[in-house]
Structures are given as structure tokens and as C-alpha cells.
Image (cartoon, grey):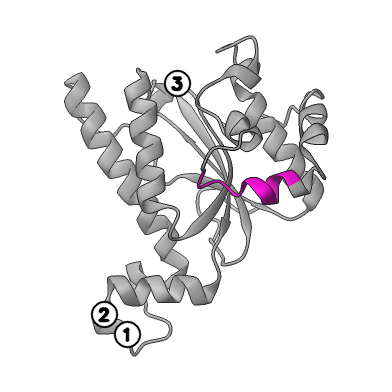
Amino acid sequence: MADIRTTSIEADCFYHIYNRGINGENIFKSDRNYLFFLNKMSEFLISVCDVYAYCLMPNHFHLLVKIKSDFELGSLVKVQNPDKAAETTPLGLHSLKNIFSKQFAEIFNSYSQAFNKENKRHGALIESPFKRKLITSDEYLINLIIYIHQNPEKYAVTDQFSKYNFSSYQSILSNSKTLLKRDEVIKLFDNKQNFILSHQKTIDFDAEF
């Protein structure tokens, strides 16, 4: 079985991205922390992937993303590195295979610096490299969305996961503007009513950490 920390990130594929604080320590201590992390996701991730679901927990987080196409990623590489515009497959940190990891590193570094400064701490905050699992079936994709949204209840952060403010559940059901792939998620469940009903069954994957 491939190492979940070194699995290659490929274009046009779905991945479960998850990680936790060093030694299981909390990485979010206030609403401001959660909102700052979400802002960094918007800043660095939307250019390289589509976000289908997320949940930020006190000491870990889960994301369900679909990596953009080679064409879209290639355009991003050229924008970020105009000197490589003539190259179709730049190597190293700027390669198509590494561009997602590079953007994620930007999130971690920016967030960790702010968190450490706020909490007067030093050193690494989040485990590295981040964990990732390739999603290979629609059934797994649907169950993963439910699992991600049920995390706050699973870990007793709240007694109603549907009320949790730092997951994508409420955003998917709302009509407010969002960067989430809301329509695509609802389509997976056929409609909003079935989305809600499907979340009433408990999904309990093996321990992720």
C-alpha cells in the first residue's frame, strides 16, 4: 500500500487531504484561527483544486478536493514562472506534480507563523508532509463527504454536526456565495433532500491518524 504521505498528486483526481497538529496538539484555538485558515485556503488552493468538502477541527482538518486539469495547472505554472513559459513540463518545485504541494506549503507556513506569533510559541505546528488518499469511486466519494461533515460529532466537539460552523455542511445547503463546488456536491446526492437524509447514516472509516 502506498505511503499516505508520499502518494503522488495527479491532475483531474479526487483526494482526501488531512493532517493534524504536531503530537496531536491543537492547531485552532479561536474562531479567528479557523477563519484565517479558511482565508488562506481561498488564497492558495482555489487556483490549483476544486474544494468539495472540508472540516476544521481543534487539532486536525479534512479536505476533499479535485485537482485541476494539466492545462489549468500548466497555466498557473507559467503565470508564477514566466521565465519557464516555453516549457510544457517544468521540473522540481514548479512542476505540475508539485504545484499543489507547493500551494499547501504556503498555507501551512503562513498559518503557522501567525499562530505561533499569537500564542508565543516556536517550531513546527502541523505535521509534514500532509496525508492524502486518492478517491477511486463515487461511493467512496459520497461516504467521505458524509464522514468529513460528521467529524465534529464523532469527536464530541458538538452534539449536532449540522450546526458546526467550521465545516462545509451549512455552506453546501445555503444559497450564499461560496467557493465550494456546491452544485457538484448536491448532484452527487441527487438533490438537497437526499444530501440531508444521507447524512443521517453514520460513516465511520478506520482511524485516519
Instruction: State yes or no: discs 2 and 1 in contact (Cβ < 8 Å).
Output: yes
Residue 208 appears in the picture as rendered:
no
Q: Residues within 10 Å of mark 1 (few under 14, many from 20)?
A: some
Residue 81 appears in the picture as rendered:
yes
**Numbered disc 1: secondary structure:** loop
Q: Please name whichever residue, 95 or 2, is drawn nearer the observer in this view of the structure.
A: 95
From the viewer's perspective, is the residue at label 3 or at label 2 nearer?
Answer: 2
Q: Position of residue 73 (x, y in %)?
A: 46, 70
First in residue order: circle 3 vs circle 1: 3
Quarter occupied by residue 20: top left
Q: The residue under label 3 is which amino acid type?
A: Pro
Q: Which residue is mark 2?
A: 82
Residue bounds of the magenta highlight: 178-186
Q: Residues within 10 Å of mark 3 (few under 14, many from 20)?
A: some
**Numbered disc 2: secondary structure:** helix
Judged left or right of residue 197, residue 208 is left
Q: Residue at x 81, y 32 (%)?
A: 193
Q: The residue under label 2 is which amino acid type?
A: Pro
Q: CA distance from mark 3 to mark 1?
A: 41 Å
Q: Which residue is mark 1?
A: 85
Q: Position of residue 121 (x, y in %)?
A: 19, 23
Q: CA distance from mark 2 to mark 1?
A: 5 Å
Q: Which residue is mark 3?
A: 58
First in residue order: circle 3 vs circle 2: 3
Quarter occupied by residue 34: top left
Quarter occupied by residue 194: top right
